[in-house]
Amino acid sequence: MRVVTTPSQLASLSREWQSSGESVGLVPTMGALHAGHSSLVDAARSSCDRVVVSIFVNPIQFNDRRDYETYPDTFDDDAEMCRRHGVDAIYRPTAETVYPTGYSTKVHVSGLTDRWEGADRPGHFDGVTTVVTKLFTASRADRAFFGRKDYQQAAVVRRMALDLDVPIEVVVCPTVRDEDGLALSSRNRRLDTSQRTRALAIPAALADVQRAFDDGSRDPSAILDAARRRLTESDLVVHYVALVDPHSLEPVTTADVGTVVLVAASCDGVRLIDNHVIELRSRAVGSR
Ligand code: AMP
């Protein structure tokens, strides 16, 4: 497994592979890798000849300086996980390499970024789309793999790639959860045992929404009131809980199969996000 640190090293590695007919898959990450990340690597492994994982804590996507400064750095463990999952190269640039003195360009996707994470975290998505554009350009990947856990991010990146004619297929993979239902996240490391238990209100709220739908509720405000209550009862600060159209991310007036529940809530300052796509479930007679 190679570790490369500059865009030109990454580009020449990709060129070398692609000139011998091999396809390249890219998995962009900020490190502190967990099984959610390795599921993206596995998906890349199964459909690409070569896999590159980028590990870069992107300063311009953090609107909270403390969040950036305390973001976990576990490179040795990350490299070991990459090796175990058959990664061919890690791209690990420094912030100075990605944004050298004089750097002046931003990539902005409008519309899809107006609400939810975009509204709560000003500048966040510009940071994401800027760095992802740079990763796409340097890696020349054939496919790039993102997690559904960051639903809005995946939609924004897909839009950006489409709008800019980027010849990379954006693949979105399912959310990986712990056994108790909490979506894996690098930020979960900041939760102690009791905070973690309180954070379980997030998957519980998502399950409440699905159950309400199964029981015939279609009115977003009634469905969301119950979900919000579930979160506040666990002393979580609710940033938003919404039922949205899966493509436009605009709030819906009626819940339907395919409608997405988006949640962002903080547990003692640790901001967590999650989502669930409403499914058609047939209820067994007498089941709850
Ligand atoms: P991050 O390192 O948090 O920027 O995440 C890098 C990629 O991993 C993003 O595409 C995330 O959506 C994805 N990811 C993070 N957590 C999970 C998870 N629990 N399941 C699946 N993908 C995830």
Image (cartoon, rainbow, N blue to C red):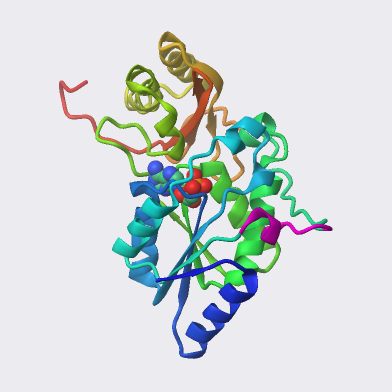
Please state the horizontal and vertical placement of residue 147, each as a whole percent of the image. 45, 49
Residue at position x 40%, y 65% from top? 44
Where's residue 274, x and y in %?
45, 34
Instruction: Note whether residue 46 is visible.
Output: yes
Q: Would you say residue 97 sits in the magenta stretch?
A: yes
- Give the image location of residue 90, x and y in percent: 47, 65
Of 41 and 254, the residue lying toward us: 41
156 lies left or right of 126: left
Q: Farthest residue to the bottom: give it.
A: 20
When the figure is inspected, residue 221 is found, relative to residue 29, above or below; the finding is above
Report which quarter residue 206 is drawn in: top left
Q: Is residue 2 above or below residue 110?
A: below
Tell me which segment is drawn in magenta: 94-102
Rendered residue at 33%/38% (across/down): 280
Taking 86 as reference, is 183 above or below it?
A: above
Q: Position of residue 154 (x, y in %)?
A: 54, 50
Nearer to me, 77 or 126: 77
Say which residue appears at 33% left-offset and 48% top-offset. 35
Q: Verify whether residue 99 appears in magenta.
A: yes
How many dots with numbers?
0
Q: Measuring 57% from the left and 66% from the top, which residue is drawn there?
A: 5
